[in-house]
Structure formats: C-alpha cells, structure tokens
Image (spheres, helix red, strand yellow):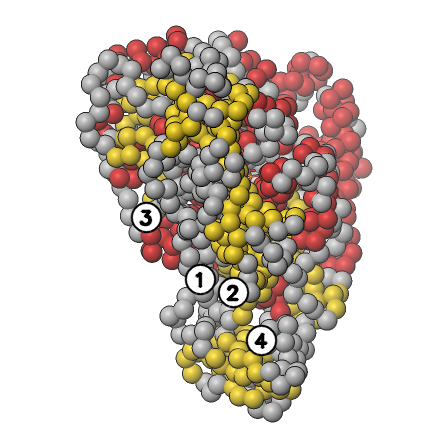
Amino acid sequence: MSMERIVREYTSIREVRGPLVIVEGIGDAAYDEIVEIELASGEKRRGRVLETTRGYAVVQVFEGTSGISPTTAKARFTARTLEVKVSSEMLGRVFNGLGEPIDGGPPLISGVWRDINGDPLNPAARDFPTDFIQTGVSGIDGMNPLVRGQKLPIFSGSGLPHNMLAAQIARQATVRGEEEEFAVVFAAIGVMYDEAMFFRKFFEETGAIKRAAMFVTLAEEPPMIRLMTPRVALTLAEHLAFDLGMHVLVILTDMTNYGEALREISAAREEIPGRQGYPGYMYSDLASIYERAGRILGGKGSITQMPILTMPNDDITHPIPDLTGYITEGQIVLSRELWNRGIYPPINILMSLSRLRGEAYERTREDHANVSDQLYAAYSRAVELRSLAAIVGEESLSDIDRRYLRFGEAFEQRFLRQGFYENRSIEETLVLGWEVLSILPETELYRIKDEYIRKYHPAYKKAAELEARKIKE
Amino acid sequence: MPAIGKIVRVTGPLVVAEGMQGSQMFEMVEVGEERLIGEINKISGDKAFIQVYESTTGLKPGEPVYGTGAPLSIELGPGLLKSILDGIGRPLSAIREVLKSPFVKRGVKIPTLDRAKKWFFEKREDLSTGDKVLPGEIIGYVEETPLIKHAIMVPPDTSGVLEWIASEGEYTVEETIAVIREYGDRKRELKLMHKWPVRRPRPVVEKYEPALPLITGMRVLDTFFPMAKGGTGAIPGPFGSGKTVTLHSLAKWSDAKVVIYIGCGERGNEMTEALLKYPKYKDPWTGRPLMERTVLIANTSNMPVAAREASIYTGVTIAEYYRDMGYDVLLVADSTSRWAEALREIGGRLEEMPAEEGYPSYLASRLAEFYSRAGRARIIGRPERIGSVTIVGAVSPPGGDFTEPVTSNTKRFIRTFWALDARLAYSRHYPAINWILSYSAYVDLISSWWAENIDARWKEYRDEAFSILLREEELREIVRLVGTEGLSERDKLVLEVARLIREGFLQQNAYDPIDAFASPKKQWEQLRTIVEFYRAALRAVDEGVPVKLIREEMAILLRDLVVTTRYRIPNERSEEISKLREKLLYTLETITEKYRTKVRRT
Ligand SMILES: Nc1ncnc2c1ncn2[C@@H]1O[C@H](COP(=O)(O)OP(=O)(O)OP(=O)(O)O)[C@@H](O)[C@H]1O
Ligand SMILES: [Mg+2]
C-alpha cells in the first residue's frame, strides 16, 4: 500500500445521491480508501472511495445516506483500506458484518489486521484438494462425495430444508482417520432473525459453538454491509487455515441476498445492467468470494466452502445460481418435488454434482465410482421412464422398463431418504447402493466392472457366504 | 522519449492520466509509485485511458505514469514450456518463490524467462557467416525439453547478413548468439529470446486449408465431429457440462506437438490440477511427461480482470511462436466467455456505447481476430516448414442459452462445434456432447486420412452409425406418445443399437486409464463391431426374429461389447475386439437358425 497514513478532513460535500456522497476539493483520495462521514448528530458512518479525481471523490456510504446533509456532514479520509482484525480468539464469538463483536463479550485482544478483499491465491501455490469428507449423508457421500478444500454450494428454494442439511453436514462432517474437527466460520448475509437464531442455537446445542465464529447481518441492514460480510468471514477463515493450519468449514447463507445487494448498489451507481439487472461484473465479484477456498502447498490447513443460496422461483438458470455454478466445484441441488413427497434430504441427485468426487473415490472403496455412476445412469433412466409411464401407462412399458421404475422408487425411499440425526458411514451407504441396484438384472449394470459385481453384488455375496459357511462346516 | 504523465482519475481497473503526449494506442505503461502494469486503450488529447493489470486499490490522482514506448509484449524463447504464466506472462512459480507467500501481490516484476538458466545452443549446420538471413530464419536450436527441439529464429521484423554466430555452447536467454547487419548497415544482436507484441499476429507466407485430423482419442470427436490440425472449434455448454474436462482431455491426449492451455477467468484449482498432474501423466504419443510439451497460462477468475483480457493474446502469440518452428500447436482457452466479459467490463468503464447484452460492439471483430490466428501455414524464412495452430475455445453461455452474443458470434468464426448438453450430463453421459446440435466442417477433408491409414470403409460406417442416432431421435418422439411396445421390430432394433452406440461408443470416461484414450484403430474396431452387429441383426429381424429374443439371448454379450471393449481392451490389443465381433455375429446366426427351425416346426 503506497498510502502514507495521513488523515484528511473535508466539509465540502457537493452532492448526496443514493448511497453515494460526492466530496469536492480533494485531489488525493486513494481508490478504495475508507472514509468516515460524521453527521451533525455526531453519528459516524463509513464508506469507501469508488472514484477519485483531481477535484472530487465519489464515496459509497455503507450504512446508507439517509440523514446526511451536505451542509453539515464532514468527510474524513482515513488513509486505510477496509481492514479487519482477525485472530483465533474469534472462535466461539458472534460478530456483525464488519467483524465487530455483538455478543456482549469483550473486545478482541490480539489479532492481525487484514484487508478484507484478500489477495488472489497463486494457482502455483495451491495444493489440490484430496481428502474425502464423510458427511454421513448417502445422497452426498454415495453420489457426490466432497473433499476438504472444495467449494460446494447448496442450491435450494424458499421453504426447503437447506439450513437443516447444512447443519447436519456441519455436525457430522469428518475426515476419517483424523481426530481434528472442523472450525466453522459462519456468515449469515441479510438473513431473517429466526434463521440466524437457528444456527446459533444449533451450534450451542451441539457444543460446536466453541469452534465456530459467526458473522451476522440481518435483512434490514444496508446492502453494502451485506457485500462485506462474506469477505470479513473469509478473511478470518484464511487466517485460521493458512496462518494457523486449521481445517475450516465456511458456511455462507444466503448468497441470493448477497447478489441482490450487488444489484441494488449497481443500480444506484447507474451502471449498465447485465442480465436481469445484475451487473456485468457479478461473475468476477462472486469469484472473488468463492475462490477463497482450497489448500496450499506445504500448508496444513484448508478452507472448505459451503455457500447456500435460494434460487428465485426455483430457477437454476437465474443469474445468481447460474454464475455460482460456473465458479464453484459442483452443487447440491434440493428438489421441491421430493420434499413435497416427504423425502429428507430432498437432494435432486441428477442435477447435483461434485467435481472433485474423483479424488474422493480414490480414498473410499474401489467400487465406489462404478456404483455411483451406475446409480446415476439407472436413476436417470428411471426418472425418464416415470414421466413416460405417466403418459402412456405402465403397461405399455417393457418388463425391463418396469424394473427400472421399481428401482427408482427404492433408490429414493431407501438410499436417499434418511433422518436428520442419521449418520451413515460410507460402507453403509455403499451397501444400500448395491441393495437397490440388485433390483435390476445384472446384465443391465453396464457401468460396473465384473470383478466388483462378483465381490459386492448381494447375489454373489450371499453365495460366497454360503460357500464359506459350507467350508467351515 | 516515452511520456511521463500524472494520474487524474482512478475508477476500478481504469486509470486516466494526463501529460501523455506522444504515447500510442496499446502502449504498455507503468502506473503509480508501485509501477503497476497497464496498457493504454484510449487516447484523447493529452489524456490516456489505461487499463491496469493489477489491483488499483490505494492508487491516487497525482501519482506518476511512465510510458514504455512499446506495446504489451511477451518474451519468446526457451523456458516457456513447463511453465505457468499469468495473463501478461509473469511466471507464477517464480512469483511464489520470490514473494514467499501463497498469494499473488501486485507490483511484482519478474520476467517471463529465467535469466540465470543456460541453454545448450547449436547453430544450424548449413549456415555460415556472410549468409543472408531472412525474417523467421532458423539459425540454431536448443533442446528445450526432451520432447521439443526449440528453433532459434531471426525475429520476424528483421533480416540481414549474418556477421557472427556463436559456437556451440551454453547461453542464457540474454546473451548474444548472433549478430546480423540489417538493411542500412545497422547491427542487430540476436539472443535466444526476442519480444513480440501480443496483439499483433506473427506473419506467415501463406495459410492452407487443414488436411490432417487432430486425433484426440475421444471417439465422439474423432469419429463424428473431428478437429483438424490448424482448425478452429468451440465447446459451449452450461456449467458442469464438461467443457473443462474435454479441454483437459484434448490437452492431454491429442497428437499436437505443443499445447498451450489458457485458464481465462476460471478456477484456480483447475490450473493447479494441470500443474501438479501433467508432469506425472505420459503423452500417449511419445511416452514422455505431458508437461514437457505444455505451457499453462492462468488468469483465474479472482485475478485482475484486465489481465484476463490480455491472457488470450499472450497465449496465442506463444502458440504462433511454436508454430513458426514447424510444430503443430494446440491452443485451448477456457473460457472465451470470461474473456468477452472482461472486454465488456473494460468497455463499460470507458463509457463506450454497449451493443447486445452490454457487450461492446467490437465483440464480433475481436472474436474473429482471435480465431483467425489459427491455421496451417507455410512459415517465413528457411528452412521451409509448415506449422499449425489449432484453437479450441470453451464458451460459457448464461443459463446455457446458445443464442446469447458470445456463443452466436463465435459460431460465425469456428468450423467445429461441440455442443454440450446439460441433460446428457445429468444422466452422466460423458462427454456430454449433443450429437444433434454438434457439427464439424472437417469430416470430408480428413476422411482420406482415415481411408489411407485405418480403413477404406471408415466414412461409410461412420455415416451409418450417425444415421442410427438420428433415427433414434425421431423415434424418441414417437415413444413419448405410444411407449416402446408400439414400435415396429425394425425400429425397436434401432433403439437397441442406438443405446449400444451411446453406451459403447459415444460415452467415454475421462478418468478411466483404458477408456480415456482410444486410438484411431481401436475406435474403428469398436465402430465396426457395432455397425456390423446392426446389419446382421437387421437381417435377422427381417426374417422375423423378435428384437426381444435377441436382446435376452445376447444380454451378456452386448454388455461385454460395451464394458469389455471400453474398459478392458487397451489400444495395443484392439484386434481383440474383432474376436468379440465374430462371437457376436456367430451367436446372432445361431439364434436366427434356432428361430428358423422353430418356425419351420410349428
Ligand atoms: N468425459 C468425462 N468423463 C468423466 N466425467 C466427466 C467427463 N466430462 C465431464 N465430466 C464430469 O463433469 C464434471 C464437470 O465437468 P467440467 O468441469 O468440465 O464442466 P464445465 O463445463 O467446464 O463447467 P464450468 O463451466 O462450470 O467450468 C467433471 O467434474 C466430471 O466429474
Ligand atoms: Mg470449466
């Protein structure tokens, strides 16, 4: 930072427009510099420099401009960029969107100041994520396993149990063979009060609060604060993971609120809108959040990111889920249809994807990849046939097609469905997978190698057990 | 004298400076006390509008701007291979070492090529002092990697009489290895490296129509929608449909000599994966580590957007440079949409009038310029040689909508279109290339290669298999109305065989050690087996044998046809497929025979 730390104060505010304040007479404001606006009442607000010229600076005020009068307000240019003090002391505490404690506890004692925007991780300094995280949820572990250091969002819809699922994952997630639990950095972005409370209570009840830091901005807070919340949270996550070597799980909810804040601010700045009014730079902006995940070479820690977003009108092509999907390493999509049929977790298997599942497969069981592929292919066929059967009737389907229908039903009811407190090991998940696959004739199992069929298929297993018993006797 | 101006305005990556008289469009400049790298992209009076390639946080009016007098250029010379560069050519591994931090901080200046490393230079045998050397003339060689002999060329912008040339020995990229007397008696020292402005195509004598296939090892591409050496292609698709995996497969398996992989505004981990794994993978054509033929360019989505715009040009300039040595070069860019978005963002800051969806009106011409840097060409200078640049760009249409501006404009300039389909990806049909929407203009051009090298019937069989797929598509509509049982026996057979083509031929698992790469010979054996099975089964059906009977009696064999040929039989043993084929045809014969006897009896 080339800024010498000289604070300059101006009373020459020329214009207040939307979230913007234009300060005249300043010729050396730094781009991105933090500005303190002091109102006549003595109230202080913060903002940052969006545009700086030789005669004026355009300042965006975080908390909004209502009540700011050009004649009485003062603008103090602080010669700092937006920084936050982070430390491991923050675990167990609750903060606002700017990283200030709101739990009534003491201020932080130690810590390092960091720019909340961070710096891009050097691709040549990253290490590829590989360690399989067992979430205990078959729809994830069996079909789309994730790894430590991955960024995997939950695409949901309003009223769907995404918070429950995220909480279940946060509680159950382990890397087998390791004792260490995840530290959780949780950012609630523009949520309703009850949602924030759900997580707080959950962390308290499970005792996870000791290893969790929560950053909360509620729906009524100004949009700029919403834009900063995930950045502040991730600045802490980076410190914990890359300075202190911890494994960190970051949950960001709800990124839709984030995207809307971005649109609101862009509109106020009168920028040329892109698709559906969202700014053209939303992709890069979202990437500057989601890319703050992963592992580094020679470092011990990791950041696993699980953003949650509710798709407006359940539409996956809406710009927020769409651009998110283009950045993250897969997505878990929730289905209203399954939820209405009483299936928890209502994971839309076909639309979900974990791009790093290949790494996970290498660390679970040899047949995992094949079983998952086969379940996919068969379930996809079952779903297609189900809609066909609805039109032409089951009787116009062949025997084999009808078997697929039965498979589809069993897959949803036995494999996918499970309890909120049910924590399945990956072996249990695979056994269930084989069980439902055995509904199909063996010759239909195109995606599974013969040796695995012989080793794990229930038909052979039974035969092998009988054989073994006979030999014993 | 390059200009020295002063900043008057900063907004995001755009900086305006005054006092910039004499500077030129696209000149590279150094901005602020930290001398951040930028490029002029608009001039008005003495004001220059500069797009800055690094974060501008903290930059203030009044800080200096230094002109360099030269356009944004890249260093070309030995040491590019095996490296990973950012969008403006800075070596990312070296940056990591110098900064001792996993993050990229701005203001670091490290040259593209290692200054300390020595390369063993050998002069061209038939060249001696006093000879006239032309632009592009090869004067010697360096073994850059065991795979690539790097030709040291006279830069395209000079020529003259060779006054002196270094003897065999070790030289750094900055040491003089030759001196030429240019026109007008000016002396010019040549080094192992030279610089070239990235936005200017390197000249060639003439461009030719592509004639040879670029073999990729991916069946759906090579057999149905082939790429040609020197050709152009696009691979559009919604998120998660397989663009990156396909581009990685191209980079890994295709029979190009040199591969340039540009990660343009995409994920950091995808570059890391290439960086960590390519040194371990073997090039199937030579058995050497893949990295020895690869240059990675990484300007990931979270790196500055202006440098993302430049990364495409940096990459294609390097590609042309290796083409000029006489190599077949493949350049893949993931994703051209992020590049177009960078254009849009910068255009917006310059307050240009936007055209469609906010993209600047010159989007189409920029795309055209980029793709026209592909081609098979006769290279300037001696010895005579031909090289090629093949360009494949991923396109990431919002919401998967192919009518949006980047996809639709790209289609005008490319000849191979590999359309990815979310529906196929959802059912784990990989590569999720939609065979109805995709096309290749090179099928006829390259079919003679297949006829000469693999089998004369290639085109005929390919077309037949393709028509089965087209017929299946029509039948699907009918099935939606009447169900499968209402179809004629011939049509039921089409559905069965189409499924075999999809499962046993089109699908290919990029992560399976055997399936990932199918040699042309193996592809042909697989294709032939399916088509000949179809022909024989059709005869049986015409004799009255029900499709259901064939399916039930042959279930195990048909599963073998898919599973065994894909996962069990490696390329070296592709003739084993013919045994399976004989068995299939024989079994079919037996079934028909049994059926005949049964019919005769009743
Ligand atoms: N040929 C293939 N074989 C096996 N798996 C594949 C293949 N192609 C794609 N996949 C699977 O699909 C996933 C997504 O593919 P990929 O990352 O290439 O998508 P993309 O189109 O590049 O998406 P984005 O636009 O978001 O970058 C991969 O992680 C992989 O699991
Ligand atoms: Mg991709």
- Please give the label number shown on residue B75: 2
Q: Amino acid at mark 2?
A: Glu
**Whole-percent x and y of residue A402?**
61, 20
Tag 2: Cα neighbours inside 10 Å, few (<14), some, or many (≥20)? many
> What is the distance, in whole Å, between disc 2 and disc 1 at their CAs?
8 Å
Tag 1: Cα neighbours inside 10 Å, few (<14), some, or many (≥20)? some
Q: Nearer the viewer, residue B441 or A20?
A: A20
Lower position in the chain sequence, tag 4 or tag 2: 2
The answer to whether residue A187 is left or right of residue A157 is: left
Lower position in the chain sequence, tag 3 or tag 2: 2
User: In terms of secondary structure, where does tag 1 sit?
Assistant: loop
- Please give the label number shown on residue B153: 4
Q: Are marks 2 and 1 in contact (CB under 8 Å)?
A: yes
Q: Are marks 4 and 2 in contact (CB under 8 Å)?
A: no
Residue occupying the point 62% across, 66% down: B323
> What is the distance, in whole Å, between disc 1 and disc 4 at their CAs?
20 Å
The answer to whether residue B322 is left or right of residue B211 is: left
Q: Which residue has dot 1 on it?
A: B111
